[in-house]
Amino acid sequence: MEPGSTATVFIVDDDAGVREALAWLLRSRRLLSESFRSADDFEQMLQQQARGDAAAEPGALVRALAQPCCLLLDVRMPGTSGLALFDTLVARGLHTAMPVIFLTGHGDVPTAVDAVKRGAFDFCEKPFSDNALVDRVEQALRRSAEVLAERHAALGVRAKLLELTDRERDVMRLVVEGLPNKLIADQLDISVRTVEVHRARVFDKMNVKSAVELANMLRASSG
């Protein structure tokens, strides 16, 4: 990430010395961080960020992560383990916007490898190389930014779709299927001229210039 970015690295480790060392390391690379001594404390923070609309919509926790971020997560901790927290993040769909890098001892490497297969971004074995760890953190933050940008774009597409009339949606569906105006007119029992007008309005509202661009936009927003 670029210096001055609002991206945040969350550190969850029960060892205060590890938390402080990691925070110092990240500061030396001009990266913001926030530390938590337990998985429960971290989850409580997520709930507090989402409080206010979490009860109204399941996606509130995802929207709470409005800026790029990643999580440095210790595998073994008293109480809720790092793995249990990771499973919770996966269940809530948070692990893509907030990539997880596990911090693990030698004995937990197989466990960390399994977590990577289930969606964790990576793991670093203690003692880790400072440069290698920060490089992976920066890559994770870039991944987070990409995911958030894709989600933002998808929300924009959905907002545009809400502006379409029912007839415009009907025309759009057939345009995306590749039907020419004459066949669209026949299927909807309207004139070709009316199809042309609706087609032009759809392109204008969706801010596209071709049926291919429209189809690609809809495909990307639903992925």
Image (spheres, rainbow, N blue to C red):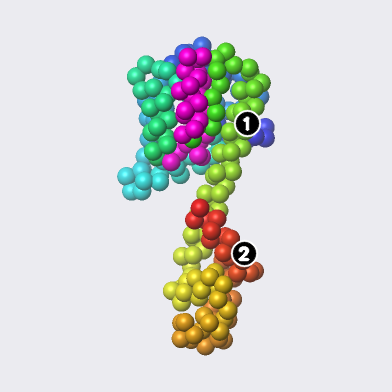
Question: Which residue in the structure is indicated by mark 2?
Answer: 213
Tell me if residue 18 comes above or below residue 181 in the rendering.
above
From where the camera sits, is residue 27 visible? no
Label 2, residues with CA under 10 Å away: few <14, some 14-19, many ≥20: some
Which segment did they paint magenta?
A: 93-118
Q: Dots 2 and 1: beta carbons under 8 Å?
A: no
Residue 3 in percent (x, y) is at: 67, 32
Quadrant holding the N terminus: top right
Badge 1, how many Cα within 10 Å: few under 14, some, many 20+?
A: some
Q: Is residue 115 magenta?
A: yes
* Helix, strand or loop at mark 2: helix
Q: Is residue 138 left or right of residue 156?
A: right
Q: Specify whether residue 157 is painted magenta.
A: no
Position of residue 8 measured from the top left corner of the image (x, y, whole percent): 55, 31
Q: Residue at left 55%, top 28%?
A: 122
Q: CA distance from mark 2 to mark 1?
A: 32 Å
The picture quadrant where one finds residue 205 is bottom right
From this view, report whether residue 131 is shown above or below residue 47: above
Question: What residue sits 52% from the left and 80% below the top?
Answer: 184
For disc 1, the marked residue is 138
Task: Inspect the image, locate mark 1, and give the three-letter code of the amino acid beneath it.
Answer: Glu
Within the image, what quadrant is residue 76 found in? top left
Residue 81 shows in the view: yes
Report the residue at 51% width, 63% height from top.
160
